[in-house]
Amino acid sequence: MATYVMRRLLFSIPVLFASTFLVFTFVSVSGDPLAQLKMQPGADQTTIRNIVERKHLDEPVPVRYGFWLRDAVTNKFGTTLLGDRPIWPELKRVMGNTLQLLIAAQILALLVAIAVGVYSALRQYSAFDYGATTFSFLGLSTPEFWLALMLQVLVVNIFLATDVRVFYVAGLSSVDPGNPLVDRVQHLALPVFVIAIGNIAAYSRFMRASMLEVVNSDYVRTARAKGISERAVVMRHAFRNALVPLVTLAALNFGGLIGGAVIAETIFQLDGMGAYYITALGEADPYPIMAWLVVTATMIVVANLIADVVLAWLDPRVRLT
């Protein structure tokens, strides 16, 4: 197991290196980062030349990439193009907030989807199965931004009618939170639900299909023929193998979760990576954008690495690949 994990970890290093190069290249060739500054009336040419020299903007892209990579590794992504503000402190703060949101949404989606998918497979064509199928279609077809707005309207109307505040519709914390943990849960509940709902629909359908395939396989029928109880057959023989495709899907879908976080954080006004990315785009500053993209790529690679480890635990044959 340790050899397998180390091999996967070593494979991740060139992937991250290639990601950084592609990110820097595509962002760099997208346009002149100083175009807006140069168009301003009375722009200080000395300031522009200082920025060009400081960021090596007059060098070829491969040379600029080398300087940027050095800053990313040794100086925590360096500083912004204008204002010379350190990038990492802000990015570190918003990354922690977004990880809270993403991890909570992923855990909620997996727990609910596994329970719904397994029960739907074991009660195929039952009323519960049909209801779960209907919910899945609705969940997959509902836009996240519309659901977020409708939940905000609903929660505000409930508060106005009852004067009881259960959830908050904006921000990460209150001015006077009282219990910080409860307050954070109240603030994150709605965005977590918005991100999780579509994934619950997708994961549950995938889990149902995987479970149906496994429970009808030969080795499960053999286990039943040996007189093993149905609960033991399902949990020991079927459930573990049915999880393998779902783990792969969840890892591949982690990038989609980050995209959903951008929408949710914008609508619920959360101080996370989504808001940070939108702000960087508005300022047309390539360096925070590149840092955000590299951190996002790293999170996706780490998610896939964790999925590889879980797969190796679920199916020992994977360790031989």
Image: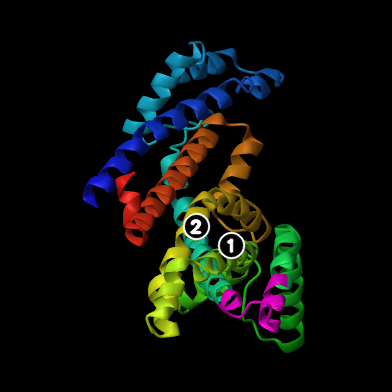
SS for tag 1? helix
Residue drawn at x 43%, y 64% is 241
Whether residue 31 appears in magenta in the rendering, the answer is no
Where does residue 274 sit, x and y in percent of width and height?
A: 58, 49
- Decide which of 29, 16 is in the foreground and name it: 16
Where does residue 51 sit, x and y in percent of width and height?
A: 51, 19
Q: CA distance from mark 1 to mark 2?
A: 8 Å
- Decide which of 45, 135 is in the foreground and name it: 135
- Decide which of 120, 44 is in the foreground and name it: 120
The stretch in magenta equals: 119-133
Residue position for label 1: 206
The image quadrant of residue 234 is bottom left
> Magenta residues: mostly which secondary structure?
helix
**Label at residue 197:** none
| Badge 1 vs badge 2, beta-carbon distance below 8 Å | yes
Image-based side of 69 in relation to 153, left or right: left
Where does residue 56 sit, x and y in percent of width and height?
A: 46, 16
Residue position for label 2: 245
